[in-house]
Image (cartoon, helix red, strand yellow):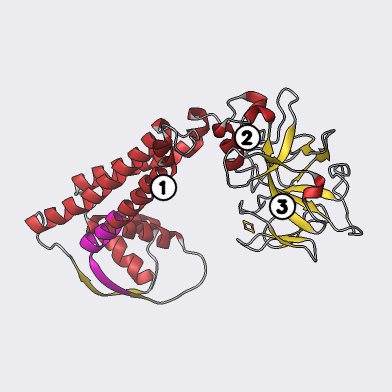
Amino acid sequence: MSEPSDRELREMSREQLVELGGELDDVAIASKTDNWPTRGTKPEKRAERAVAAWFVVSGLLALAFVLVYILWPDRYVVPGQDGYVRYSWYTPLLGFTFGFSVLALSIGVIAYQKNFYPDEVAVQQRHDGPASEVQRVTATARFAEAGEDTGLGRRKLLRRVLLGAGAIFGVTAGTLAIGPFVRDPWQGGDNAALWVTGWKSFNEETVYLRIDTGVLGEIVRVRPEDIVPGSMMTVYPFRESDRGDKELLLAAERASDSPVMLIRFRPGTAITHRPGQEDFHYGQYYAFSKICTHLGCPASLYDTQNNISICACHYSAFAMNEGARVVFGPASRPLPQLSITVNEEGYLIARRDFVEPVGPTFWEWRAG
Ligand code: FES
């Protein structure tokens, strides 16, 4: 068929444009039924209110998410201490409010589509190439017509509720951007939790390697002879100033960046070091973060025959005798190595904190 001129196009009504668009696109409407042929009936209003209710629920949950994020206490509280139950609800509440907000919004959209979209069967022939100007104009008209058909233009309640829910939902997404200004992760300057791990020494106090016996308060520091060649043990940081303070001891054990694998290689094991970390070990003793650099699982399934440590989550494998470099799997960088030595009492100690980020990611991390 011949395409109309620009002037003819401008003079056509929306219905004519819709019809023309269908013809140009080889679209044939096989059938079309309006769900609500009589406007303003009680069942229609009931359906409208039901859809609106879902958008209201979604908006309220999104608002609850923002309030929980800003007001709920998120500082770590040791189990058994005052405030622990409240603290332990922080993450579940964030997940619940955001997840169910998305769910309610989705149910609202589906209910709207089911109740108010006309039941239409259309058949279109395929054709290639970019759309012409006429096709673009008519496609726009068909979108507008679809909006009219679904009644969004005249359903004020639905439109307002949808806009309100969308706005609150937008605020929820914006919370992610403004979150750091509300809860500053850099509070504490150079000693902010993001910069340091439990292995950092304050006031030059010695940080020992300690094993977890399962009895809180029982302190077992590690000596080189405590670990046989070709084996690995998990150790945690310990300071004498923490002794007797169950809260500090537990916090040191529970911190996600604390666990370290202490490995004693067999004599004769071929070992290579990462540049600049040649003196991080003590003889055959090497210490590496246990936290996988992929997504943070414990990477400590240690194969003593091949000196490979595997993370069971997604099977990243690290060659521990080669600076824990990644030899398989999705992890993108080696496990960070902790610099250790033995003090004059004969205990293994940390010489300094980790010199690189522990775990899967970091606020200031740049790949490459
Ligand atoms: S978390 Fe270790 S491989 Fe994914």
Q: Position of residue 156 (x, y in %)?
A: 20, 45
**Residue 165 picture quarter:** top left
Between the residue at mark 3 and the residue at mark 1, the CA separation in whole angstroms equals 35 Å
Mark closer to the observer (3, 2):
3
Which residue, given by chain and number where applicable, does mark 1 sit on? 95
Amino acid type, mark 2: Leu
Identified at 33% across, 58% down, the residue is 143
Of 2 and 63, nearer the camera is 63
Which residue, given by chain and number where applicable, does mark 3 sit on? 233
Q: Dividing the image into four quarters, tell me where ligand 1 lies.
A: bottom right
| Secondary structure found at label 1 | helix
Q: Position of residue 64 (x, y in %)?
A: 34, 39
Which residue, given by chain and number where applicable, does mark 2 sit on? 194
Amino acid type, mark 1: Gly
Say if mark 2 contacts mark 1, CB within 8 Å. Answer: no
Q: Position of residue 105 (x, y in %)?
A: 32, 51
Magenta stretch encompasses residue 120: yes
* Residues in magenta, as a range: 108-122
**Residue 16 picture quarter:** bottom left
**Residue 167 picture quarter:** top left
Amino acid type, mark 3: Met
Magenta stretch encompasses residue 187: no
- Farthest-out residue, right: 268
The quadrant of the image that shows the N terminus is bottom left
Q: Is residue 131 left or right of residue 336?
A: left
